[in-house]
Image: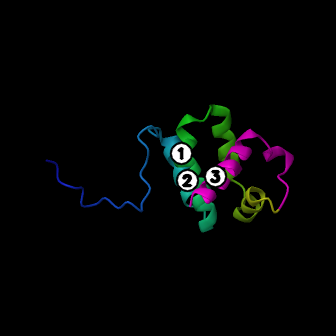
Amino acid sequence: MSMPDPDFDPNVPRIPPVLDTPRLRRIRFRAWHRGMKEMDFILGRFADRHLASLEDADIVRFEALLEMSDPDLYNWISGRESIPADHDHALTGRIIAFNNTAQNAD
């Protein structure tokens, strides 16, 4: 019988094993450490769930979104403001849908 991990904390997100490249680990870190807690949860949970399965083009789009300010991103994702054309793509739609689904599941 194995001993429980004394460092295990169920409240700390674990790095999915498929995020085995430095680039994906860096993106995940940036998604969880934004500065605005709401965006940490939105982008961090999305990264945990979907980052490993994104196509390269969507990874580039996700990185571009990470460069945007938290208030702008929050307003776009919450529907308070229109998404600018250069960030209005299927990936942003997936993040919005994921956020709406996650909120409804809580």
Q: What's the amino acid at mark 3?
A: Thr
Q: Is residue 72 magenta?
A: no
In the rendered image, residue 33, in percent from the top left (x then y), is placed at: 55, 61
Q: Residue placed at 60% from the left, 55% from the top?
A: 102
Q: Specify which label sits upstream in the sequence, 3 or 1.
A: 1
In the rendered image, residue 22, in percent from the top left (x then y), is placed at: 48, 42
Q: What's the amino acid at mark 2?
A: Arg
Q: Is residue 11 above or below residue 1?
A: below
Using residue 17 as the reference point, say whether residue 61 is left or right of it.
right
Q: Residue placed at 24% from the left, 61% from the top?
A: 6
**Depth check, front residue: 19 or 90:** 90
**Depth check, front residue: 59 or 26:** 59
- Which of the labelled discs sits on residue 101, or is there none? 3
The residue under label 2 is: 45
Main secondary structure type of the part rendered in magenta:
helix
Q: Specify which label sits upstream in the sequence, 3 or 2.
A: 2
**Quadrant in which residue 90 is drawn:** top right
**Quadrant in which residue 59 is drawn:** top right
Q: Residue placed at 73% from the left, 56% from the top?
A: 77
Q: What's the amino acid at mark 1?
A: Arg
Label 2: state its secondary structure: helix
Q: Are marks 1 and 2 in contact (CB under 8 Å)?
A: yes
Specify the farthest residue to the front: 105
Quadrant of the rendering where the C terminus is positioned:
bottom right
Cα distance in 3D space between marks 3 and 1: 13 Å
**Residue segment shown in magenta:** 81-106
Mark 3 residue crowding within 10 angstroms, few (<14) / some (14–19) / many (20+) = few
The residue under label 1 is: 49
Which of the two marks, 3 or 1, is nearer to us in this view?
3
Using residue 36 as the reference point, say whether residue 18 is left or right of it.
left
